Amino acid sequence: MNQAVNTQDVTKTTIGEWLVRDLVEQYPTTMSLLSPWEIDTCCGGGRKVSEALTLHGAPVDDVLDSIVDMVAATRG
């Protein structure tokens, strides 16, 4: 995992700045929220989550909210 990712700071803003590969590596279940938008880790997942969502026409705020909720549920 990228050393720059602080998994303690999980907010919509911080998750949007994570690389797709780092998000999926740390929280594999989030792939279920990204795959409907055809976002995956082929090509290395080297884009920021918010950038990938924008490029794929996803509702960025809604998807990021869902990711935050999923991560919070995973963390207990």
Image (cartoon, helix red, strand yellow):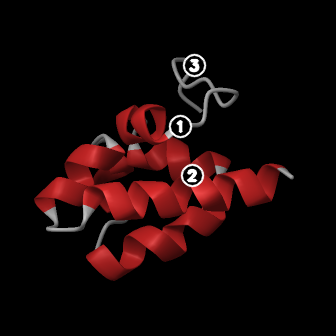
Q: Specify the quadrant of the image occupied by residue 1.
A: top right
Disc 2 + disc 1, Cβ < 8 Å: yes
Disc 3 + disc 1, Cβ < 8 Å: no
Residue at the image position 28 percent from the left and 75 percent from the top:
38
Residue at the image position 39 percent from the left and 39 percent from the top:
19
Report which residue position mark 2 lands on.
Answer: 68
Instruction: Tell me, for residue 28, which label it has, or none.
Output: none
Label 2 to label 1, Cα distance in Å? 6 Å
Residue at the image position 14 percent from the left and 68 percent from the top:
57
Residue at the image position 57 percent from the left and 19 percent from the top:
3
> Which amino acid is tagged 3?
Gln
Q: Could you tell me which secondary element the residue under label 1 belongs to?
A: loop
Res 73 visible = yes
User: Along the polypeptide, which appears first: circle 3 or circle 2?
Assistant: 3
> Does 25 appear above or below 14?
below
Task: Depth check: give the residue in front, 45 or 15.
Answer: 15
Task: Depth check: give the residue in front, 34 or 73.
Answer: 73
> Which amino acid is tagged 1?
Thr
Task: Depth check: give the residue in front, 73 or 47.
Answer: 73
Report which residue position mark 3 lands on.
Answer: 3
> Does 64 appear above or below 58?
above
The residue positioned farthest toward the bottom in the image shown: 36
Report which residue position mark 1 lands on.
Answer: 11
> Which amino acid is tagged 2?
Val
User: Along the polypeptide, which appears first: circle 2 or circle 1?
Assistant: 1
- Residue 42 x, y percent position in the rendering: 34, 62
User: Along the polypeptide, which appears first: circle 3 or circle 1?
Assistant: 3
